[in-house]
Image (tube, rainbow, N blue to C red):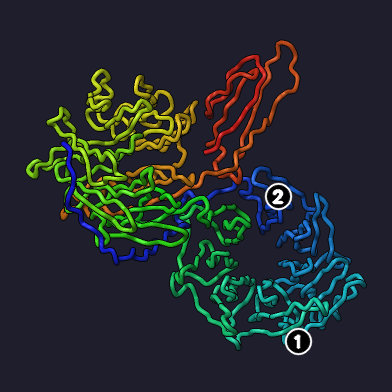
């Protein structure tokens, strides 16, 4: 039946798309963003830094550990009584370490003390920053004020300047080398110890974008102050510009942490239980307590202002996060990190956040959208010709993300009211498929406007799976199940033969032409031009002839999805019998017997015959041409509520979460299940470009005749993006073929061995 539409509902030519604001998601609660590093578990971690090459350095109980993403290397501390307080990677490639015995410089594996006294005791270095021209500034002091040695040491090459109180100079100068230059700090920048002696007891440092040094002067027993020092290298000295005390609204005591936010505000916290958060904003201090919001004590040991504008605050076994003018509280088990006492935070060069449970464990939190991005209330559909990304909202709006801008379209623009699929045609035009006013309908986007028309005899809606552009340019559309016979809906298949030039002219294949298609769960095309229609039964169409596949009982059951890879092979998702591939002549089956996690296949995205993604009832699996990798994204599948997987032109994997009730909302309206709109989101993943490394951990170079050597190997993914126990290995003997990747061991044989690793 050939039909040509003469009526067309046009969008208002003056109506522009509406601005759209993506709904933010709480990334901290997304478990797939967290990576734990068991190598540091229980090793007494105290601090972290990162050098110019991207190598991370951790200060531990036993010394320093470096980590380049693959290898962990320990540099043992030189003295058993040395405790590491802080570590800093300087621009000259040296690692500076603040300890209870002074300031050390580490190069390769050698430790050199560059600031201490002749007795090497009482010089407690607790923080380090780098000033311009490579100058190192370190704070010296302790909250117990047990030593008179306190202040700031400024090291530039061989020049050393120590800023201290008059009392410190009088009492301790004789303990230091004569080449140390002493600068006496004005008394108003000091605090008294238990004896009443004034000390410049420097606890924490922050070098601001305005080239000021903010220094916390604090102790366990006295209200502290913030000293603001100017960096004036032309004079070779720091200038004491300003101080802030309790009279200015500052409330600090005991250990203090300072951070500068991206907007220039200075944030200050301390771990005294009754103190709160201090924020310096244009010279005025704002003060508030998180206990007023969340209860508990106001003991905040550390603070981080990350590059995205977020503030991270330790909360004594929990932590707080301030973003978009809102505070959130996080604690185990809602997050994987746990701490009996304190959290520390560090932002690495890739903008990830390292969260350290002091003395206990280390996690990396992916705080970016480079690898993972979640968009609430959106399902990804396709990439436009100009690289734009197109989505559908749970309420049926179409959203476009183009060059950082977001806009939406609705029925007022000519869009159908219940789209379930958007496709980008080969000639660059977008089509939205689904329903309009409870009738199967389409809209196409042309000249900046949506144009829609209905297909009243097809069904109440077009199934989201039943959309396919064939090699001849035709657009094939199939019906959703549960036809309304009383409205003369007959099912069948609609073919828009030339959508580019005649978008409203279509052919409707109906039961009168010998087909009985009441539902269609997918359409694909093999390289020979044969069109395949999923559902029950499985139909094909070629040379104007319709056929039902009858000689394979597995294909007589429901085929719930159909996908065509770029080579022209069609992949069929059986509801009961696994995954079936065909080239139009023969069939290949993949089931639990050869590696699939389940025979109930929900969705497929096949790039090539050797790169196939499959969603089963239990898992997301990947086929690499040799074998199946399972448990690829276990955290994703745990929250999966139906939906699809697809790969965009940009190389991203998209996981759509949307349930069956949502896809059938036009049929059930107005009695649609309210849960149909819940848990509606899309998750974008950028595959990891860094491969894992494989190494033999135990082997023999030579074996005596008749000997039986044993080989052990292991793999390491870059920054543990994949857990080691989930890595799969391939091996070959005597330069033969590589085996399938798996976690199985090597059988006994007499051979020459190579091994390789795959990551997920």
Front tag of 2 and 1: 2
Q: Which residue is pictured at 50% across the width and 78% down the height?
A: 288
| Residue 80 numbered mark, or none | none
Q: Position of residue 27 (x, y in %)?
A: 46, 57
102 up-or-down from 503: above or below: below
The residue that mark 2 highlights is 66
Q: Is residue 667 visible?
A: no
Q: Quadrant of residue 458?
A: top left
Q: Position of residue 231 (x, y in %)?
A: 75, 77
Secondary-structure class at tag 1 = helix
Report the Cα–Cα distance between label 2 and label 1: 41 Å
| Residue with the most extreme top position | 706
Q: In this rendered view, identify the residue nearer to me: 223 or 685.
A: 685
Residue 249, quarter of the rendered image: bottom right
- Residue 140 is situated, as x and y percent measured from the top left of the image, at 75, 71
Q: Which residue carries the number 1 mark?
A: 187
- Left or right of 749? Residue 338 is left
Q: Earlier in the sequence, mark 2 or mark 1?
A: 2
Q: Is residue 23 left or right of residue 212?
A: left
- Which one is in front, 6 or 105? 6
In the image, residue 520 lies at what x, y percent?
24, 36
Work out whether residue 417 or residue 131 is closer to the camera in this orientation and state it: 417
Q: Residue at x 83, y 68 (%)?
A: 156
Q: Are marks 2 and 1 in contact (CB under 8 Å)?
A: no
Q: Residues within 10 Å of mark 2 (few under 14, many from 20)?
A: some
Labels in figure, total = 2
Circle 1 packing at 10 Å, graded few (<14), some (14-19), many (20+), is some
Residue 76 in view of the camera = yes
Q: Quadrant of the N terminus?
A: top left
Q: Does residue 82 appear to the left or right of 524 in the view shown?
A: right
Would residue 141 be found to the left or right of residue 331 on screen? right
Which type of secondary structure does the marked residue at label 2 adopt? Answer: strand
């Amino acid at each position: 039946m050939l039909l040509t539409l003469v009526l067309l509902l046009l969008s208002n030519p003056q109506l522009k798309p509406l601005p759209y604001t993506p709904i933010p998601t709480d990334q901290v609660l997304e478990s797939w963003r967290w990576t734990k590093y068991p190598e540091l578990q229980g090793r007494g971690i105290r601090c972290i830094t990162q050098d110019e090459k991207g190598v991370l350095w951790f200060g531990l109980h036993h010394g320093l550990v470096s980590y380049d993403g693959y290898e962990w290397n320990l540099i043992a501390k030189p003295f058993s009584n040395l405790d590491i307080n802080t570590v800093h990677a300087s621009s000259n490639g040296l690692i500076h370490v603040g300890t209870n015995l002074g300031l050390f410089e580490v190069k390769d594996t050698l430790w050199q003390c560059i600031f201490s006294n002749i007795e090497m005791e009482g010089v407690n270095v607790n923080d380090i920053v780098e000033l311009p021209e490579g100058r190192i500034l370190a704070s010296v002091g302790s909250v117990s004020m047990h030593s008179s040695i306190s202040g700031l040491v400024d090291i530039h090459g061989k020049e050393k300047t120590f800023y201290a109180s008059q009392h410190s100079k009088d009492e301790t100068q004789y303990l230091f080398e004569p080449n140390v230059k002493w600068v006496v700090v004005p008394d108003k920048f000091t605090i008294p110890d238990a004896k009443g002696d004034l000390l410049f007891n420097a606890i924490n440092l922050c070098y601001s974008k305005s080239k000021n040094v903010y220094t916390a002067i604090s102790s366990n027993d006295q209200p502290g102050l913030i000293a603001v020092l100017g960096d004036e290298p032309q004079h070779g000295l720091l200038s004491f510009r300003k101080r802030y005390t309790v009279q200015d609204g500052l409330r600090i005591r005991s250990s203090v942490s300072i951070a500068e936010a991206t907007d220039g505000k200075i944030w200050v916290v301390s771990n005294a239980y009754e103190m709160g958060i201090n924020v310096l904003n244009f010279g005025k201090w704002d003060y508030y307590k998180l206990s007023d919001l969340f209860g508990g004590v106001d003991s905040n040991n550390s603070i981080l202002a990350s590059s995205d504008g977020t503030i991270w605050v330790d909360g004594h076994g929990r932590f707080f996060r301030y973003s978009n003018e809102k505070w959130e509280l996080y604690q185990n088990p809602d997050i994987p990190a746990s701490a009996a006492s304190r959290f520390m935070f560090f932002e690495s060069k890739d903008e990830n956040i390292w969260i350290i449970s002091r003395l206990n464990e280390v996690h990396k939190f992916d705080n970016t959208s480079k690898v993972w991005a979640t968009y609430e209330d959106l399902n990804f559909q396709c990439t436009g010709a100009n690289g734009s990304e197109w989505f559908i909202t749970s309420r049926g709006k179409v959203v476009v993300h183009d060059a950082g801008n977001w806009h939406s379209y609705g029925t007022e623009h000519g869009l159908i009211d219940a789209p379930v699929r958007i496709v980008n045609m080969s000639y660059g035009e977008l089509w939205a498929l689904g329903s309009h006013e409870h009738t199967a309908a389409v809209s196409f986007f042309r000249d900046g406007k949506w144009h829609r028309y209905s297909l009243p005899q097809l069904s109440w809606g077009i199934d989201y799976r039943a959309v396919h552009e064939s090699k001849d340019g035709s657009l094939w559309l199939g019906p959703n199940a549960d036809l309304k016979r009383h409205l003369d809906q007959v099912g069948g298949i609609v073919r828009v033969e030339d959508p580019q030039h005649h978008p409203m002219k279509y052919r409707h294949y109906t039961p009168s032409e010998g087909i009985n298609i009441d539902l269609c769960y997918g359409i694909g095309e093999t390289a020979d031009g044969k069109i395949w229609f999923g559902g029950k039964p499985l139909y094909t169409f070629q040379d104007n002839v319709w056929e039902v596949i009858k000689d394979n009982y597995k294909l007589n059951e429901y085929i719930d999805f159909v996908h065509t890879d770029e080579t022209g092979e069609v992949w069929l998702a059986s509801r009961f019998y696994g995954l079936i591939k065909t080239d139009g002549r023969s069939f290949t089956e993949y089931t639990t017997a050869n590696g699939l996690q389940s025979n109930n296949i929900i969705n497929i995205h096949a790039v090539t015959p050797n790169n196939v993604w499959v969603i089963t009832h239990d898992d997301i699996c990947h086929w690499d041409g040799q074998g199946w990798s399972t448990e690829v994204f276990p955290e994703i599948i745990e929250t999966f509520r139906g939906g699809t997987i697809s790969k965009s032109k940009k190389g991203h994997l998209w996981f759509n979460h949307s349930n069956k009730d949502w896809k059938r909302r036009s049929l059930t309206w107005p009695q649609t299940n309210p849960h149909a709109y819940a848990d509606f989101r899309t998750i974008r993943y950028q595959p990891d470009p860094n491969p894992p490394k494989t190494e033999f951990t135990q082997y023999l170079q030579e074996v005596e005749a008749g000997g039986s050597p044993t080989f052990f190997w292991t793999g390491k993914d870059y920054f543990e993006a994949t857990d080691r126990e989930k890595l799969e290995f391939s091996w070959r003997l005597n330069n033969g073929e590589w085996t399938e990747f798996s976690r199985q061991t090597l059988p006994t044989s007499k051979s020459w061995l190579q091994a390789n690793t795959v990551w997920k």
